[in-house]
Amino acid sequence: MMYLYALIVDYLNEDEFGYAFPNVDTLALKYGKSTRTTNAHLKILRDVGLIEFIEGTMYGRAYVPYEPLEADDFYGKYPDAWNAYKSNIKKLEYERAQARIRMQTYRDKQG
């Protein structure tokens, strides 16, 4: 989703309008996802405060990108995200440990 956010920032017409106005089809094409997925990801970016939607411009929907929060501010505002991050790190560490064990077992069998 950060790539989608970067696409919106790239489309930002700060000098003249103060917002980005690519249509969802264009974003989806450049993002490499369906329009449905792109719309869902845009809503997530909005919900976490990275973009704002402006409806009804002469170009249809427009987007105002905001600067991302620092990690401490983000996780302070969204503590569930911090818990999910910690959980995913533990899962990744476990999977890596299991892969090392499997590789060692394989090497031991190969002699």
Image (spheres, rainbow, N blue to C red):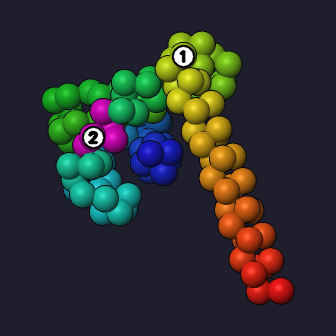
The answer to whether residue 24 is above or below residue 19 is below
Query: In the picture, which quadrant includes the C terminus?
Result: bottom right
Residue 23 appears in view = no
Foreground disc of the pair 1, 2: 1
* Depth check, front residue: 32 or 76: 76
Estimate the spatial distance between the alpha carbons at disc 1 and disc 2, rounded to whole Å: 22 Å
Would you identify the image quadrant in which residue 83 lies?
top right
Looking at the image, residue 11 sits to the left or right of residue 91; the answer is: left
Residue 58 appears in view = yes
Query: In the picture, which quadrant includes the N terminus?
Result: top left
Badge number at residue 79: 1
Looking at the image, residue 7 sits to the left or right of residue 29; the answer is: right
| 41 falls in the magenta region | yes
Report which residue position mark 2 lands on: 40
Would you identify the image quadrant in which residue 29 lies?
bottom left
Task: Say which residue appears at 66% left-offset and 47% top-offset.
Answer: 94
Evaluate if marks 1 and 2 touch, with contact meaning CB atoms under 8 Å apart: no
Q: Amino acid at mark 1?
A: Pro
* Depth check, front residue: 93 or 98: 98
Q: Farthest top residue?
A: 76
Q: Say which element carries label 2.
A: helix
Badge number at residue 94: none
